[in-house]
Amino acid sequence: MYDILIRDITVLPMTEQNSVLELYDVAIKGQHIVDMGPSGTIDSEAQHIITGTHQVLLPGLVNCHTHVGATIFRGTTEAMKLKEWLEFGTSLLEQLTPEDFYWSSLLGCCEMIRAGITTFVDTFFYNDSLNLLKLAMATGVGKTIDLLIMTLP
């Protein structure tokens, strides 16, 4: 028995042939796809059945450049020129506490999950990679381990 069976979904497997598999069933056990085939061709016993009609299943997206700890600042500086933004941003960063960083990062992870992002690379000045890695693991999002070394003015 599967944990989840998604029926009649369109699958984009991202193969060299750029194929589109329409009306497929996809079986999931735990965190893994364990079977897939044209609708009605695989075992239909599952704890949860989801109708995938008019939906698309594709591999998770990867955000290769983010500053998840700065999510809390989004929308505060759109009209600024780069130099002004860097100066303003530096003053804000200096005011961040570890708890601010945690909550901002959690918000960022939730937004990424909702957008289909399964892995991210974070390069934020408040370099707390270990705690961010723990947070990512708790939310189910993958994170690469980074080390940021730079001198701020």
Image (cartoon, helix red, strand yellow):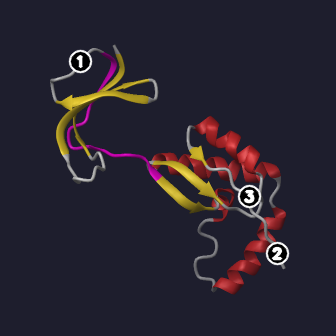
Disc 3 marks which amino acid?
Leu
Disc 2 marks which amino acid?
Leu
Where is 68 relative to 20, above or below? Answer: below
Where is 31 relative to 14, above or below? Answer: above
Q: Secondary structure at mark 2?
A: loop
Disc 2: CA contacts within 10 A as few (<14), some (14-19) or many (>=20)? few
How many numbered marks have been drawn onto this rendered protein structure? 3
Q: Earlier in the sequence, mark 3 or mark 2?
A: 3
Provide the residue designation for mark 3.
147
Q: CA distance from mark 1 to mark 3?
A: 46 Å
Disc 1 marks which amino acid?
Ser
Disc 1: CA contacts within 10 A as few (<14), some (14-19) or many (>=20)? some
Query: Residue shown at 56%/53% (left/top)?
Result: 120
Based on the picture, tell me whether residue 50 belongs to the magenta stretch: yes
Provide the residue designation for mark 1.
44
Direction front: furthest residue? 16
Q: Earlier in the sequence, mark 2 or mark 1?
A: 1
Q: CA distance from mark 3 to mark 2?
A: 15 Å
Provide the residue designation for mark 2.
152
Q: Point out residue 148 in the picture as x, y percentages from the top left corner.
A: 74, 62
Q: Point out residue 38 in the picture as x, y percentages from the top left corner.
A: 16, 31
Q: Secondary structure at mark 3?
A: loop
Q: Which image quarter holds the N terminus?
A: top left
Mark 3 vs 2: CB contact within 8 A: no
Where is 26 relative to 68, above or below? Answer: above
Relative placement, left or right, of 9 versus 133 is left
Specify start and end residues of the magenta stretch as a single range. 46-61
Disc 3: CA contacts within 10 A as few (<14), some (14-19) or many (>=20)? few
